[in-house]
Image (cartoon, rainbow, N blue to C red):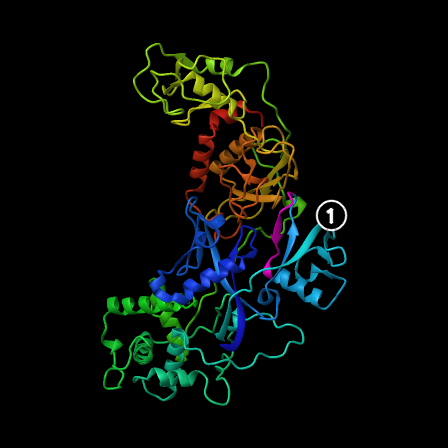
């Protein structure tokens, strides 16, 4: 532990493995819920502070951001930075998008830029932190070292991120600024975790598992004359990692001894924790945890874990030392903290790492896919077939109904026995004509169906608004680009017996056409080329062939508003999910996923793409 002051920045992990900061206002809101403790419920509704984030909720127990309308989960973290750095001064560095809006840099990048700016450097090269850009302060521009493309950057002032003072995990402490003076000693921390851990340390040091008064525990956190720093780990132990966990040497410990020592540690800790206040006679009540059964011990551990989580301290996963059966996460977390504090051998696990891409592959190792001709496809802007009016198109799919039933048209919500209630541009058909779709049998005003067709892609197809049955060949509005596909000699998690199909989508930014939301306006294309992965199995190849049909029909991507960044007029996925994570599944877009291939086949079928479609299309 480290006694210091820091600014807290809450961040979320995007699909490219980058930690993106929440705004200062949102971070303040999350901190307020964290500091409110268990009474706040353990979840944060982001829409309460930023209406653009209305679908998002943060679950503090699992440290995940949950999107309510799509079910997407993304990891979040609580990160610490130097109070003298950019977030501690309310400074935000941003770069300009293709559509003229501004995007903040990742926090580490913004801090690096601000440090160079304060040193009055004429420019800063970001190559050393993994970005091929140069920031020129004289022109306030960002220059791509490879393409020489330039973008505007700006420095603006915002709220200062929330400040904390007390004990901070070393792994979450900020990078020290060059030449910065050491932070002065801060007051002792009285959070539940520190009181709990230090009380156990004191009890073990005194050779007693008896009760320890809370005030005595606090004195042990930082005795007069300086802060008490825990001893360094023993030989073979590894330093803390960025997530606050470490791997220590695994020792073989008799299970009975572990149970006895852990029970003693738990007993002393619970008696010394603030959850057991002194009675009227000034003595702290003793709780004999060794006598509790497993159910009660779990209930106690879960309650304590929630207190720790509400205080901003995540639970610690711990390996079960006495067997291979799974350990309740809350019980494992609190037991790991207490056993570590007591000096008992605990094997803390390293959290899984995000693996977006496979190991490097040489050109000679890349192979074409058997049964699929070529290795790439290009698309251009395909305009709808001309020469047929909407009425002529719909005539192929409709049967006239002379005596309509006395029910609502689900497009205009007027009775089918009455004229259409549509008030837009007037189609050339009579408003009281009624038709039935030939395959699904649903009945509508023909007037309403013509209006719906005119408001769509006008590609000669029609989709029933009730059951989504597709008539004709549905096409989309995907902008021009390239789709590459080939085999690589690596296996996906969950598919050890086959190689991997890699798909690479490349779409450049451009100008929107008449079929897009804002014709004539530029659109951006973030994150390209996008790499996606399928197992080279029979079903995986089937999915690939159908994706090729979807690509040719311009159904893989569209232009709209990103659900990830909120940016408008940008290329987005179009209702056909892809796996963009090669060797892990931390974002939900990776493997193993036993149901993915079946799910994506269902999504393609909803777009009118099936095996029959693949047979009709040229490879």
Classify residue 348 by image quadrant: bottom left
Measured as percent of width and height from the top left, residue 111 is found at 63, 64
For the residue labelled by badge 1, is the local secondary structure a helix, a strand or a loop?
Answer: loop
Q: How many marks?
A: 1
Q: Is residue 84 left or right of residue 281?
A: right
Q: Where, quadrant-wise, is the C terminus in this rendering?
A: top right
Disc 1 marks which residue?
A: 149
Q: Which residues are magenta?
A: 99-107
Magenta segment: does it hold 418? no
Work out whether 586 lies above or below 117. Answer: above
Considering depth in this image, is 426 or 283 the residue closer to the camera? Answer: 426
- Residue 500: x and y, percent? 54, 44
Q: 284 or 268, which lies in front?
A: 284
Q: Position of residue 164 (x, y in %)?
A: 50, 71
Picture residue at 46% right of the left edge, 55% below the top: 49
Query: Is 592 above or below relative to 231?
Result: above
Q: Nearer the viewer, residue 241 or 218?
A: 218
Whether residue 493 is visible: no
Q: Is residue 124 left or right of residue 162?
A: right
What is the residue that sits farthest to the front in this orientation?
423
Q: Quadrant of residue 92?
A: bottom right
């Amino acid at each position: 532990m480290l006694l210091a002051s820091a600014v807290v920045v809450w961040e979320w992990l995007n699909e490219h493995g980058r930690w993106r900061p929440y705004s200062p206002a949102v971070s303040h809101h999350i901190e307020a819920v964290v500091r409110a403790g268990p009474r706040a419920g353990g979840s944060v509704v982001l829409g309460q502070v930023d209406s653009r984030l209305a679908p998002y909720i943060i679950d503090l127990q699992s440290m995940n951001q949950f999107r309510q309308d799509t079910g997407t989960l993304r990891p979040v973290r609580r990160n610490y930075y130097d109070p003298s750095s950019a977030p501690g001064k309310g400074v935000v560095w941003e770069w300009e998008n293709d559509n003229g809006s501004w995007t903040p840099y990742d926090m580490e990048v913004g801090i690096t830029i601000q440090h160079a700016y304060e040193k009055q450097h004429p420019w800063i090269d970001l190559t050393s932190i993994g970005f091929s850009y140069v920031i020129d302060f004289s022109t306030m521009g960002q220059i791509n070292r490879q393409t020489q493309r330039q973008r505007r950057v700006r420095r603006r002032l915002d709220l200062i991120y929330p400040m904390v003072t007390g004990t901070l995990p070393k792994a979450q402490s900020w990078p020290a600024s060059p030449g910065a003076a050491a932070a002065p000693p801060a007051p002792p921390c009285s959070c539940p975790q520190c009181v709990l851990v230090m009380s156990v340390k004191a009890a073990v040091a005194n050779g007693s598992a008896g009760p320890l008064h809370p005030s005595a525990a606090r004195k042990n956190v930082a005795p007069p004359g300086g802060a008490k720093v825990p001893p360094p780990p023993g030989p073979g132990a590894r330093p803390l990692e960025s997530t606050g966990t470490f791997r220590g040497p695994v020792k073989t410990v008799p299970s009975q001894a572990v149970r006895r020592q852990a029970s003693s540690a738990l007993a002393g800790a619970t008696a010394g924790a603030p959850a057991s206040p002194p009675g009227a006679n000034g003595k702290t009540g003793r709780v004999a945890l060794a006598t509790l059964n497993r159910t009660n011990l779990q209930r106690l551990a879960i309650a304590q874990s929630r207190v720790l989580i509400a205080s901003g301290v995540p639970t610690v996963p711990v390996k079960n030392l006495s067997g291979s059966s799974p350990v309740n996460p809350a019980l494992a977390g609190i037991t790991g903290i207490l056993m570590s504090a007591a000096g008992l051998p605990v094997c803390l696990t390293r959290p899984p790492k995000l693996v977006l891409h496979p190991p490097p592959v040489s050109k000679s190792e890349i192979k074409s896919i058997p049964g699929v001709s070529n290795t790439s496809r290009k698309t251009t802007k395909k305009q709808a077939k001309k020469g047929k009016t909407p009425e002529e198109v719909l005539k192929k799919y409709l049967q006239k109904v002379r005596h309509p039933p006395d029910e609502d048209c689900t497009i205009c919500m007027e009775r089918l026995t009455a004229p259409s209630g549509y008030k837009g541009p007037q189609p050339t058909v009579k408003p009281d004509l009624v038709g039935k779709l030939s395959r699904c049998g649903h009945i509508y005003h023909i007037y309403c169906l013509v209006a719906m067709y005119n408001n769509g892609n006008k590609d000669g197809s029609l989709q029933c608004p009730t059951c989504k049955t597709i008539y004709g060949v549905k096409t989309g509005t995907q902008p021009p680009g390239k789709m590459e596909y080939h085999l690589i000699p690596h296996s996906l998690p969950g598919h050890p017996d086959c190689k991997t199909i890699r798909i690479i989508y490349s779409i450049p930014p451009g100008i929107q056409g008449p079929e897009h939301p804002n014709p004539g306006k530029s659109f951006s294309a973030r994150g390209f080329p996008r790499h996606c992965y399928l197992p080279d199995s029979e079903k995986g190849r089937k999915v690939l062939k159908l994706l090729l049909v979807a690509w040719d029909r311009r159904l893989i991507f569209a232009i709209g508003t990103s659900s990830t960044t909120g940016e408008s007029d940008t290329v987005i996925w179009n209702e056909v999910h892809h796996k963009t994570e090669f060797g892990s599944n931390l974002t939900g877009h990776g493997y193993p996923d036993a149901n993915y291939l079946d799910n994506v086949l269902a999504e393609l079928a909803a777009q009118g793409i099936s095996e029959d479609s693949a047979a009709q299309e040229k490879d």
